[in-house]
Image (cartoon, rainbow, N blue to C red):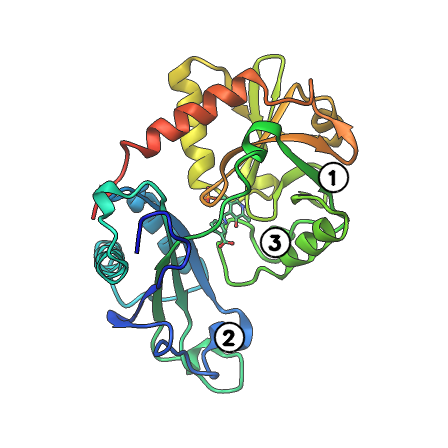
Amino acid sequence: MDATSTATVPAISIDGVQYTRETAHISVFDHGFLYGDGVFEGIRIYGNRIFRGERHMNRLFRSAKIINLEIGMTPTQLLDEIRATARVWSETNGVDLAANTNPLYVRAVVSRGDGDLGLDPRKCPAAKVVIIVDRIKLYPKELYETGLTLVTTAIRRNLPDALPPQIKSLNYLCNILAKLDANRQGAAEAVFLNHMGYVAEATADNLFIVSRGVVITPPVNDGALPGITREAVLELAATLGIPSREDHVSLTDLFNADECFLTGTAARVVPVAVIDGRTIGAGVRGPITTRLMEAFIRLTETDGVLI
Ligand code: PXG
């Protein structure tokens, strides 16, 4: 199978044992399934390097700690298991990762594990660690030139004192509701506002605006996931000498922005052209967005843990 083929076979590890798509199964009593009780990460493998693997492990273990979920392996062991699963993917699909230009996607899920029909997590003796390695579709290529069309959604970002948005949990129903809203309106993504009316993020991406030469993204306390791509973009802005800060972003700030872009593991850095029918800036990919997009692509070509 050649490196650009889309028909690839996923590699799947459950608790350190390799399975195929046909043989990988989870119990219907798993509380990840019954209650959405668990946490996850979406990670990219560019070439033969896991992009910011340690930071993903760090976020995963911090998410798990908040929900009192004991992961039965260390961050290093989990990263090693991702490596092992990526090697199985490479062998199964006959793709040499060192020469691979179509990045892989890793879904690492830690669920509460098998329990009984009550929600009490104490009934689940062992967390389950699932790693899936395959490819994921990006937005169509042309949207990286022309920009996405977004809508704001009436669905509010989870209240931080209900379900803290900092936890990358298996509860994505709030995000799904917002995505349904975007789909219904023919938009690529929906923008969440928080309970204060400030912009939080999109359904699976962080949001940035550029205003008078300054790159601004909502603080995590406004309901944004502490995105790995977001963090990398803030670092790149500093390296490039582009001023940046975390700050509240109101709807007015959003509509009046000179540029807007989203960041995420799947999307990378993608420009936004229209929000709620308002053209953002000149309606074309802005110069600062372009610099950050290019810098991020360069970073993915060098940064990461070798397989
Ligand atoms: N906000 C939310 C709510 C997310 O779920 C991001 C921001 C961006 O964070 P990162 O760390 O990726 O820069 C995410 C990321 C999927 C998928 O399969 C979801 C994400 C990432 C990759 C794949 O739906 N969410």
Q: Are marks 2 and 3 in contact (CB under 8 Å)?
A: no
Secondary structure found at label 3: loop
Secondary structure found at label 2: helix
Residue 286: percent from the left, percent from the top?
59, 19
Specify few, some or many for label 1: CA neighbours under 10 Å numbering under 14, 14-19, or 20 or more: some
Q: Mark 3 and mark 1: span between their CA atoms?
A: 16 Å
Q: Mark 2 and mark 1: span between their CA atoms?
A: 32 Å
| Residue placed under numbered mark 1 in the picture | 197
What numbered label is drawn on residue 31? none
What's the amino acid at mark 2? Answer: Phe
Q: Can you tell me whether the CB of the residue at mark 3 lies under 8 Å from the nearest atom of ligand 1? A: no
Badge nearest the viewer, 3 or 1: 1
What's the amino acid at mark 3? Answer: Asp
Residue 235: percent from the left, percent from the top?
40, 26
Question: Which quadrant of the structure image shows residue 201?
Answer: top right
Residue furthest out toward the bottom: 116
Residue 265: percent from the left, percent from the top?
45, 44
Q: Can you tell me whether the CB of the residue at mark 2 lies under 8 Å from the nearest atom of ligand 1? A: no
Q: Residue at x 50, y 21 (%)?
A: 290
